[in-house]
Image (cartoon, rainbow, N blue to C red):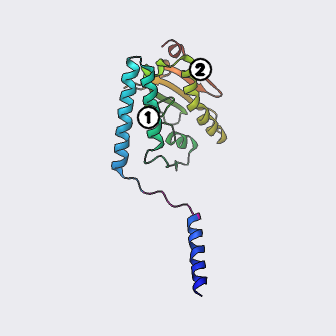
Amino acid sequence: MTVGLIAGSAGGCAEESERPSPAPPVSREAVDRHDTAIDRQLETMRRAAASGDRAAVARAQSTLERLAQTHPAAARTSSARDPFERMLEDFPFKRPPLVAQQVTTTRGDRRVFAGVDRAAFCLLTPAARREAVEAVHRPADARLRTDGITDFELVVVALTRSVATLDQALAIGRGNSVRLTSRGRSC
């Protein structure tokens, strides 16, 4: 009988261990500390880009990627019902290779303006700029197309305090293509 109880208990433990455990709650302080570290790296990247230091920009971006992967809320997935809203909630904000620091959209429109540090973006070669935009646009566009949304546009602009417009575009991702604008090619 004791053996039966032990086996039963062990079986119960095995079943419980197969169930995914809920994610532990994330403290606001932990998130704030992590966000502060990300903001410091963004400032480091901005200063390095302004001085033309490609190696320092690359180091800052590497640290940003590590911070994004270890963010206390990184395991969170969107619960939005609308596919476009889900994509926005899961947008790779402040993550290389694009490092969008500002993301805006207008209700009813499937155009996303991603604000980047102009100096850091322009420090990349034109091919690397296009690849950075593709790395964000292609997966988002594919995900939305799976849900029947075919009019998504990603417009990359320099960070701005005002409402971004298409005239300010450095790059545009639309459909299966990503292109640098004349502004994005000549920076």
Q: Earlier in the sequence, mark 2 or mark 1?
A: 1
- Left or right? Give the position of 50 relative to 14: left
In the rendered structure, which amino acid carries the disc numbered 2?
Arg
41 vs 84, nearest the viewer: 41
Q: Which residues are magenta?
A: 18-24
- Left or right? Give the position of 63 relative to 36: right
Q: Position of residue 163 (x, y in %)?
A: 41, 26
Q: Residue at x 61, y 32 (%)?
A: 138
Judge whether 156 appears above or below 139 on screen: above
Q: Position of residue 152 (x, y in %)?
A: 59, 32
Q: Work out how far the residue at label 2 is from the one at label 1, CA to CA, in angstroms.
A: 28 Å
Q: Nearer the viewer, mark 2 or mark 1?
A: 1
Q: Residue furthest front?
A: 3
Q: Quadrant of the N terminus?
A: bottom right
Asked if residue 31 lies in the magenta stretch, the reply is no
Describe the element under mark 2 as helix, strand or loop. Answer: strand
Disc 1: which residue = 63
33 vs 62, nearest the viewer: 62
29 vs 137, nearest the viewer: 29
In the rendered structure, which amino acid carries the disc numbered 1?
Thr
Picture quarter containing residue 181? top right
Disc 2: which residue = 179
Q: Residue at x 53, y 36 (%)?
A: 108
